[in-house]
Image: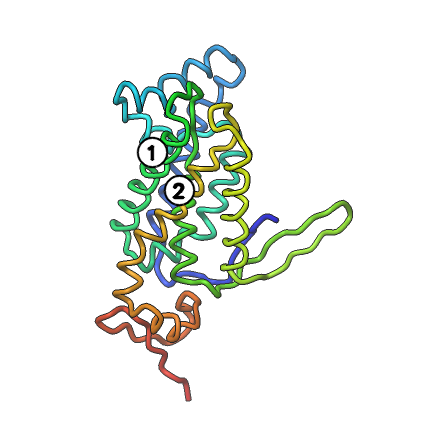
Amino acid sequence: MIPIRDHNPSGRTPYVTYALIAVNVVIFLGYWPLFSDPRAINAFFDGWAMIPVRVSAQGDYAGLVTSMFLHGSVMHLGGNMLFLWIFGDNVEEEMGHVPFLLFYLAAGIGAGIVHVLSSPASLVPTVGASGAIAAVMGSYLLLFPRAKVDIFLFFVFFLRILPIPAWIMLGIWFALQLVNGVGSDPSAGGVAYWAHAGGFVIGIGATLPLFLRLGGQRFWARTDGHPPHPEADYRIGRSRIPVVKRRK
């Protein structure tokens, strides 16, 4: 089950989302040649990745930030940027550009800390923006639970693109992180499931004040659980809850 797009274009240009994607891609291209030399790429990640034992035992927190902009492969980078592309623009529109950037960075650091807590003695370098992006997904779930997301389903010869509500897609994704996190050893490397789950919960919690300020359940009632559509004629009140003007 792979999300490929949503049906919710934002009404503002998501400059921060675009910039984050661009920065991640440019940084990856910068060290891409090192992948041909295992010793060189291992040394690079040793210096810039987040290594849990260095955080827990040595207080070396820099990796919590730098690791968010590193990826271990083209597929790793592409998957993370796809999720950020799909879910980032609408969350950025509701939060505003600068608050969204601060939210992204803080949630990414928080997700990294959750991973450290899950395996504080691990020596395995951890890289990826997925903890921060998981927070964006949690925020999206809280704000727009009924938004439609197209997912690509494939099983042997069965291929289909299916639109489903965001709460189903994101709920399944979160459940998988929990199940896999319980069934795996974080110190053995691989996917940082607890960073994903932690980032998701952090995203929901950090977005809750905005959600309440927008009106809580009244915001859902006004928007039907969808992002405001830019093609509609909206009047934004002081609460930033969109009020639709009916066209004659």
> In terms of secondary structure, where does tag 1 sit?
helix
- Amino acid type at mark 1: Ile
Q: In this view, does 89 lie above or below 30?
A: below
Label 1: which residue?
113
The answer to which of 107 and 98 lies nearer the viewer is 107
Q: Residue at x 52, y 13 (%)?
A: 38
User: Could you say which disc has been placed on residue 198 in the image?
Assistant: 2
Q: Which residue is drawn at 37% across and 56% down?
A: 91
Q: Do the residues labelled 2 and 1 touch (CB within 8 Å)?
A: yes
Picture coordinates of residue 32, whole percent (x, y): 48, 23
Picture coordinates of residue 21, whole percent (x, y): 41, 41
The answer to which of 92 and 225 lies nearer the viewer is 225
- Amino acid type at mark 2: Gly
Picture coordinates of residue 30, whole percent (x, y): 42, 24
Q: Residue furthest top?
A: 39
Q: Residue furthest front?
A: 182
Q: Which of the marked residues, 2 or 1, is nearer the chain's N terminus?
A: 1
Q: Is residue 171 left or right of residue 121?
A: right
Picture coordinates of residue 199, whole percent (x, y): 39, 43
Q: Is residue 196 left or right of residue 66?
A: right
State the quadrant of the C terminus. bottom left
Q: Callout 1 environment at 10 Å: few (<14), some (14 to 19), or many (20+)?
A: many
Quadrant in which residue 243 is drawn: bottom left
Q: Is residue 178 left or right of residue 210?
A: right
Q: Residue at x 39, y 17 (%)?
A: 46
The answer to which of 52 and 164 lies nearer the viewer is 52
User: Alpha carbon of mark 2 to alpha carbon of mark 1: how far?
Assistant: 9 Å
Q: Callout 2 environment at 10 Å: few (<14), some (14 to 19), or many (20+)?
A: many
User: Could you say which disc has been placed on residue 217 in the image?
Assistant: none
Q: Which residue lies furthest to the right in this view?
A: 157
